[in-house]
Amino acid sequence: MESSTFVLFGATGDLAKRKIFPALYNLFADGKLSGPLSVIGLGRRTLTNESFQAGVLDSLHAFSRRKVEDSPELQRFLKSFEYSVLDVGHPEDYRKLLGHVQRREEELGLPQNRMFYLSVGPEFFGEIAANINASGLGDTRGWKRLIIEKPFGTDLESARELNDSLNAAFTEEEIFRIDHFLGKPMVQNLEVLKYSNPVLRALWQNRYIANVQITASETVGVEERAGYYDKAGALRDMFQNHMLQLVMMMAMQLPKGSTPEDVRSKKRHVIQSVRPLLRENLAQNVIRGQYAAGEINGRPVDAYTSEPGIGPSSQNETYIAARLFIDDPLWDEVPFYIRTGKRMKEKSTRIVIEFKEPFNDLHNLNRLNLDPNLLIIDIGPEEGISLQLNTKNPRQHGQLEPVSIRHDSANPELPEAYENLIYDALLGDATFFAHWDEVELSWQWVQPIIEATAGGTLPLHLYPAGSNGPAAADELLGDAHWWLD
Ligand code: BG6
């Protein structure tokens, strides 16, 4: 990997502390950051380099997956962090920043490779990109790249505006849009699982699959994010991005090559083929929910509308479930059931693939009420894969019963999503970043939900905290049911 300067906007923020500093440290400790490192943190507050470095160290102690012990190596790592005050709206601050970046490039003998990480609200993206351009920070003899975080806009139109403003300063190839679900090891494993296992490859299609269920449930509530969450809701916070990315990763056909463009074009094909929602049948395919008071792990919890910062009449959804179809020969008529919510029974992100009942009438086995074969892919917090099969139980007169074969890949040493993604961005590998086309097509697909919600035509169902969501979501599945509830 070529050395570079890592310019971090929002360096005094929460994400930097929890995810970005620990990710950089773990990459450094794993020997993945070759050559000297220059990180320039930016914020509005005045800070000396020393107090900034002390903050970085605190965050490592609190959040690094590796133990942090004092050593010359650790000191070298910390010394590579410097700080500059920057107000995003002040062009002169960017000129000062350019001087700072160039000084460090000279001191450390770094090539002019510059990574700009915008760990700030999306309302600042356009202005920052324009100032990077105008100040000369973007005129480099090496590469320049931009990392941004979701949310990418709040609807189709605002996402397009946001993208146009970024494109004024960065090309699509230079923009790395983080969707941290794409950094999760098991999500990155999905493609490999298919192409390296002929058994799965053969079955990955509508001939054998009855339905696919993708769940991301959380036990936490709105936490301290009322201001953001009450506007975003589960649709913008999780569904438009993480959940639809999981659909793409799950359903994409195997690319012929392994370049980022190969993978992204297969993903694009999936999201392009998701059958559009029609206003007239929206309520039969999309369920919005909001948590009422309830109990989680024996502890009573408040209703969403009693949370600090949330108004008593908020109609915001904390849960969303949808049934969607992919109009492609491989997936024709296979329903995908997707759901995500806060304050649910457990924290779990998983994909369950239910296989079709193969035995219709053969040997009258259907009389035995066979369980279907299930392939369960646990993405987090525990990772694992299990396959549910039917076997004879010799102790029960040869009665058929389901057994589960399970592989657990829980390993505390696994790199975290942010480590994987920052490393890939530094290498210039965009495979596991959201391409603009995917983002735009995802907004396009959810746009009718946004409009129906705004128009008050999509009901909001209450569900008790600690449950698996509103009962109405069960009806989406018709004769089937959610597995592992
Ligand atoms: C974030 C959402 O993108 O993902 C949060 O903004 C959510 O609301 C989080 O809690 C879930 O991520 P993970 O990795 O904990 O499943």
Image: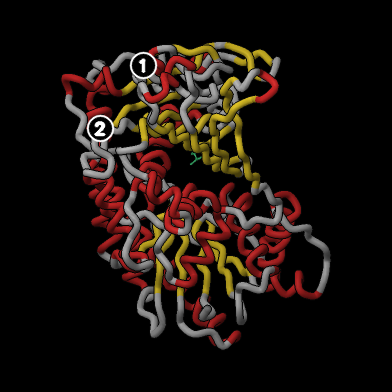
Q: Position of residue 4 (x, y in %)?
A: 51, 77
Q: Position of residue 453 (x, y in %)?
A: 28, 22
Q: Position of residue 151 (x, y in %)?
A: 39, 44
Which residue is nearer to you in this view: 36 or 94?
36
Q: Does the beta carbon at disc 1 come under 8 Å from ligand 1?
A: no
Mark 1 is surrounded, within 10 Å at the Cα level, by few (under 14), some (14 to 19) or many (20 or more) other residues, namely few
Q: Is residue 105 in view?
A: yes
Nearer-N-terminus badge (2/1): 2
Rendered residue at 17%/23% (across/down): 279
**Marks 2/1: CA distance?**
15 Å
Q: Is residue 263 above or below residue 6?
A: above
Mark 2 is surrounded, within 10 Å at the Cα level, by few (under 14), some (14 to 19) or many (20 or more) other residues, namely some
Q: Is residue 87 in view?
A: no
Q: Which residue is mark 1?
A: 479
Tag of residue 189: none
**Relative to 21, 429 lies left or right:** left
Which residue is nearer to you in this view: 304 or 197?
197
Rendered residue at 41%/19% (across/down): 364
Which residue is nearer to you in this view: 334 or 52?
334
Q: CB under 8 Å between callouts 2 and 1? A: no
Rendered residue at 66%/67% (across/down): 49
- Rendering quarter of residue 143: bottom left
Question: What amino acid is labelled 2 in the image?
Answer: Glu
Q: How is the image coloured?
A: secondary structure
Rendered residue at 32%/53% (across/down): 253
Which residue is nearer to you in this view: 203 or 146?
203
Secondary structure, mark 1, is loop
Q: Position of residue 162 (x, y in %)?
A: 28, 51
Question: What amino acid is labelled 1 in the image?
Answer: Asp
**Relative to 471, 485 lies left or right:** right
Q: Is residue 177 above or below residue 384?
A: below
Q: Which residue is mark 2?
A: 333
